Amino acid sequence: MKIESWLFLGGTLFFLPIAIVYGFMTGWSEWVGIPALFMLVALALMLGGYLMFTAKRVGPRPEDRNDGEIHENAGVVGAFSPWSWWPIVVAGSAAIGFLGMAIGWWILYIGAGLSVIAIIGWTYEYSRGDHAH
């Protein structure tokens, strides 16, 4: 993970001067791009710091070592549910929410309500029904 952490920390060193130069070129009067660039710097710094912290805690992975073998990374990566319909419901409710911001605020509330139902359904999908543990 050290390569990833240095990549993001290098992004911090790249985007900070860019943000300052952009600020000087616009006379510090542009109130969308300047904060966005500084938030980009903060995001790269947070990600790089987190990955650096995790790399120190976990140690070198097989893909980080020169003598790493493919079989060392074999095994279960995570739990995935290929039959789940809840991600589609979450995406649809988010689309309805964004449509509400563009067309009318009352549609946003419908999207927010559907999002709550979809997230709860997705979270508790393994706690009930055929796939309960």
Image (cartoon, rainbow, N blue to C red):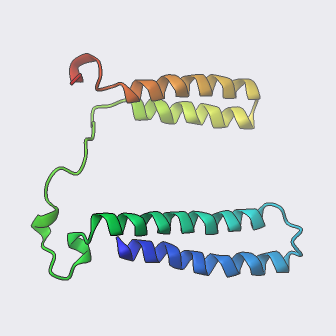
Picture layout, residue 10 above or below residue 123? below
> Which quarter of the figure is the N terminus placed in?
bottom left
- Residue 35 versus residue 100: which sits nearer the camera? 35
Write the residue at 40% across / 72% down: 4
Residue 38 location (% of width, % of height): 69, 67
- In the displayed image of the protein, which residue is found farthest to the front? 57
Question: Is 52 on the left or on the right of 133, as rendered?
Answer: right
Q: Place residue 105 in its image quadrant.
A: top right
All told, the count of numbered labels is 0
Q: Place residue 27 in its image quadrant.
A: bottom right
Question: Is 92 on the left or on the right of 121, as rendered?
Answer: right
Picture layout, residue 66 above or below residue 102? below
Residue 70 location (% of width, % of height): 13, 69
Write the residue at 48% across / 69% down: 48
Residue 35 location (% of width, % of height): 75, 63
Write the residue at 73% across / 38% down: 102
Write the residue at 86% across / 75% down: 26
> Which quarter of the figure is the C terminus placed in?
top left
Residue 55 location (% of width, % of height): 34, 68
Question: Is 61 on the left or on the right of 5, as rendered?
Answer: left
- In the displayed image of the protein, which residue is found farthest to the top? 129
Picture layout, residue 36 above or below residue 108? below
Picture layout, residue 91 above or below residue 39? above
